[in-house]
Each structure stands twice: as C-alpha cells, then as structure tokens.
C-alpha cells in the first residue's frame, strides 16, 4: 500500500470520527448543556444537534420530566411542645437546564434538605391539634416557601405532600381518652336535652289536657244550669197551671198533681242504693185511689164521661183518701 493511500484512508477515518463527535441526538424529555473549553455556551433541545468536536462537549444531561423525592421521617416539636414524627414527598420539575446544572451542586439533595428544614419550621409554628386537622394548610405553606427558594435553580416545585404525622404513643393514648371524654360529654348533653324536651312536651300535654277538661266542665256546667233552669221553668209552669186549676175549681188537676208527686216519691224510695228493706206505712187503697184520680183525668182527656154511683152521687172531683192505720 502506498503512502498516499494510507494518508487518504487516515483522512477518511478522521472525518468519520469528527462526524460522529459532531452529531448529537438529544432524546425527548431531556436537555443537554454544551460547554466550550469548560464554559457554558448553549443548551441542546430534543432532536439532532451539531457541536464542534474537541472544542465543545456535552457537559450535563438534564431530565426535564417531573420527578419525585421521598422526604424521610423526622422529628418535629410543635408550638405546644409535643414531639411528632413526619414524612412526605416532593414533586418538582426542571424548567431551565443551565440553572439547575450550574447554580446548585446537587439539585435533588438541595431540594430534599430545603424541604425538611421548612417542614420543621412550618409544623413547629403550629399546635398538635392544628397539625392533625390542617394538613392541607401545611402542604400549601410548604409549597409556597420551597418553590420560592428553588426558583433561582430553574426548578418548579409542583406539589409537597405530608404523608404521615405520628405523635408519641403516650400522647395518642391521652388523645384517645380525651376523645372518649368528649364523646361521653356530648352523649350526656344530648340525653339531658332529650329528657328536657320530653318533660316540656309532657307538661304541654298535661296543660292542654287540663284546659280541655276545664272547658268540658264549664260546658257541662252550662248545660246542667240550662237543664235546671228549664226544669225549674217547667215546674213553675206546672205549679201555675195547678194554681189556675184550683182557682177555677178543677179538682182533677189537683188529683193529678198529688198523684204524680206520690208516685215520684215511691220511685225514689225504691231506687235508693242503700235500701235493703222498704217499709210502706201506707195502705194499698191509697195508691189505688190516687191512680183512680189519674184514670179519671185520662177519661176526661179522651172525652169519656164518668157514670153516676148507686146512691146517685158523682165520683168525679173526689180526692183520694188514705186509710188510717189501725
């Protein structure tokens, strides 16, 4: 092989080598920083790029995808001097490959320590009850602080989540006793309130019943008074009619009046509940005579005329006599 051929072959190999070194393929989701003699010059985006071999070089390969970091568990003292342990996760994304490469030495380590420090600061300014009940507020405060601190590094912190907050075991037991006491207290209050409502409703019911009973008694009293008034009026009218009959000489009216009172008195005596034996100090002829007077009144009412007796005297108008007891 001649010397010329060797030189040509060497030049071809050198050209191929330069071509390989000059052509750079950047994958999707990544950016490459280019340094010329050690100084940053430009950033290569995804796709095919050309650099100057031996003069420019790929300095850093930066992933532009969103990444996640686990925040290890750490102890935190709250504002009310309670010791708790907390851990979490951080989601971040590089927006500027050059800043993330040259403004901070170890990006992930820096973000991790920054998050842990601010976690102690934020959670230490809150009480234990606030830590357990306001976890969203903790996440928001941490996100604002850490995102602001990492902005010069070309990083966007998208989310910070506190995963677990674990108080000491004795504190957990004390909280359990406190919760049980609060529940017992609420149960007692609800029970007392129920009894109070029941008593109020019972009293209202009794009041309504008493009012209704009083109204019933009043209505009954009005009815009784009205009945007595009518009875008295009827009695007065009957007495007036008897008086008129006596004044006009109508003996039958007198017989009816006496017989009615006579029968009513016998009825009251016979219906007395404490009567075991009824003594009748009267003769049967007296009752028969009274009933005879009533029958004469009935005959006169229907137009029947009484006959004459054997001795020529009339029985009409005679008052029944009672026999004398021997």
Image (spheres, grey):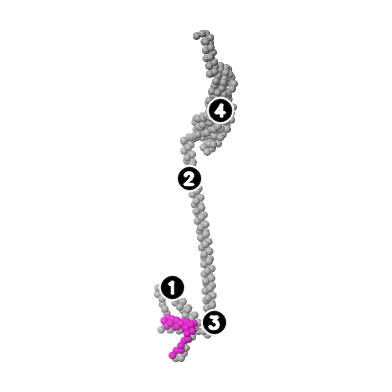
Q: Position of residue 324 (x, y in %)?
A: 43, 84
Q: Main secondary structure of the magenta part?
A: helix
Structural crowding at the residue carrying mark 4, measured as other residues with C-alpha within 10 Å and reported as few (<14), some (14–19) or many (≥20): many
Give the foreground label among 3 and 1: 3
Cα separation, mark 4 vs mark 2, equals: 53 Å
Range drawn in magenta? 282-310
**Lower position in the chain sequence, tag 3 or tag 1:** 3
Cα separation, mark 4 vs mark 3, equals: 130 Å
Give the foreground label among 4 and 2: 4
Residue at 53%, 12% (x, y): give it.
8
**Residue marked by disc 3:** 244
Image: 248 above or below 232: below
**Lower position in the chain sequence, tag 2 or tag 1:** 2
**Lower position in the chain sequence, tag 2 or tag 3:** 2
Cα separation, mark 2 vs mark 3, equals: 88 Å
Callout 1: SS: loop
**Residue marked by disc 2:** 184
State if disc 3 and disc 4 touch (CB < 8 Å): no
**Residue marked by disc 4:** 94
Callout 4: SS: strand
Quarter of the picture containing the C terminus is bottom left
**Lower position in the chain sequence, tag 4 or tag 1:** 4
Image: 259 above or below 164: below
């Amino acid at each position: 092989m001649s010397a010329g051929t060797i030189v040509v072959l060497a030049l071809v190999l050198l050209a191929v080598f330069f071509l390989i070194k000059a052509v750079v393929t950047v994958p999707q989701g990544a950016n490459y920083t280019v340094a010329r003699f050690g100084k940053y010059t430009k950033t290569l985006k995804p796709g095919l790029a050309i650099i100057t071999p031996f003069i420019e070089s790929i300095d850093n390969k930066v992933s532009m995808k969103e990444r996640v970091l686990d925040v290890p568990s750490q102890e935190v003292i709250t504002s009310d001097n309670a010791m708790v342990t907390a851990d979490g996760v951080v989601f971040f994304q590089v927006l500027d490959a050059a800043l993330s490469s040259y403004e901070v030495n170890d990006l992930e380590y820096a973000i991790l320590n920054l998050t842990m420090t601010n976690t102690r600061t934020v959670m230490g300014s809150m009480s234990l009850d606030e830590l357990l009940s306001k976890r969203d507020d903790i996440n928001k405060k941490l996100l604002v602080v850490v995102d602001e601190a990492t902005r010069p590094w070309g990083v966007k912190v998208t989310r910070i989540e506190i995963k677990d907050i674990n108080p000491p075991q004795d504190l957990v037991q004390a909280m359990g006793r406190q919760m049980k006491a609060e529940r017992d207290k609420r149960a007692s209050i609800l029970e007392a309130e129920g009894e109070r409502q029941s008593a109020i409703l019972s009293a209202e019911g009794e009041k309504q019943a008493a009012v209704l009973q009083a109204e019933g008694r009043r209505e009954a009293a009005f009815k009784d008074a009205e009945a007595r008034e009518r009875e008295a009026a009827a009695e007065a009218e009957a007495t007036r009619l008897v008086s008129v009959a006596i004044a006009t000489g109508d003996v039958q009216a007198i017989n009816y009046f006496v017989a009615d009172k006579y029968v009513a008195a016998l009825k009251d005596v016979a219906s007395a509940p404490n009567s075991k034996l009824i003594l009748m100090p009267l003769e049967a002829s007296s009752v028969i005579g009274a009933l005879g007077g009533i029958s004469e009144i009935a005959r006169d009412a229907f137009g029947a005329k009484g006959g004459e007796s054997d001795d020529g005297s009339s029985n009409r108008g005679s008052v029944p006599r009672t026999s004398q007891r021997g």
